Image (spheres, grey):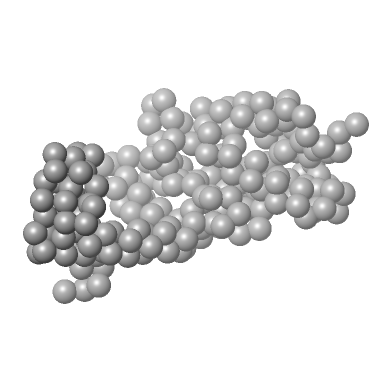
Amino acid sequence: MSSRSCRVEEAAIIRREFASFPAGWTACSDKVTAGQLHLNTSQDQLVRSLRTVAKRYLSDRELWNLALTDELTGLLNRHAFFFLADQQLRLAARSGRCALLFFCDVDGLKRINDGFGHLAGDEALIRSALILGQTFRKSDVVARIGGDEFLALALETFEECEGTIRKRLEKKLKEANAASCRYALSMSVGVAKADPASPRSIGELMEEADQLLYQNKPRFEGGGTVAHSAFERS
């Protein structure tokens, strides 16, 4: 049995065994305070073993999350995105649905870094991640793939088309920029559509979306496209 299979089995054991104990009990010597339920040696050893397994399982889960998450923003990282986006595309193809790949780039990040320092630049990336998290659905795959670049893959529906998502992103950017801050955020966006009638890989969709993004990107550093320009507030 593989190590991961063992972990899954251990997790199932934890849920099953803990569910069998009375609610509210706590182990105290050889007794359980709730209802004064006595534990024999084998039961006591089982409890200790389960606690050890639970700690190891939680530790492994934390490591797994760290491996999949962008440390700065909390979004998925590049590796996790490619894995999950590929699964999402396969699901869309099986169900005959289109998907939309959004390639988003934060405008003027260099200017923010130069003008306000790298902590402000990190703040801009975190704010951008929050905005994207509010723009896309929980079922969509959203990630920071490095630097000032973000990707989001969304299954298209009648209610969730490219225009609807763009408008929601613009609204969230305007709301964020209305708050007190030294600079405003702006994003350039390129969108590629995955059609199950003519399947393409994530890499091919990224290339198209990237080209469209840079066609729309401001010619000067610090300009804006989706909502506002990234500029120094007075």
Q: How many marks?
A: 0
Q: Is residue 197 visible?
A: no
Q: Nearer the viewer, residue 105 or 219?
A: 105
Q: Nearer the viewer, residue 51 or 41?
A: 41
Q: Is residue 102 visible?
A: yes
The N terminus appears in which quarter of the rendering? bottom left
How far across and down, in percent of the image, does residue 142 sit?
A: 49, 47
How far across and down, in percent of the image, does residue 189 sit?
A: 62, 43
How far across and down, in percent of the image, does residue 139 sit?
A: 38, 40
Question: Which residue is situated farthest in the right direction here?
Answer: 234
Q: Quadrant of residue 4?
A: bottom left
Q: Nearer the viewer, residue 233 or 230?
A: 233
Relative to 138, does residue 200 appear above or below in the rendering? below
- Residue for point 67% across, 35% down: 226
Q: Quadrant of residue 228?
A: top right
- Residue for point 59% across, 32% down: 169
Q: Quadrant of residue 188?
A: top right
- Residue for point 36% across, 64% down: 60
The C terminus appears in which quarter of the rendering? top right
101 on left or right of 113: left
- Residue for point 51% across, 27% down: 164
137 on left or right of 130: left
How far across and down, in percent of the image, does residue 130 sit?
A: 58, 39
Relative to 16, does residue 60 appear above or below in the rendering? below
49 on left or right of 181: left
Q: Nearer the viewer, residue 139 or 75?
A: 75
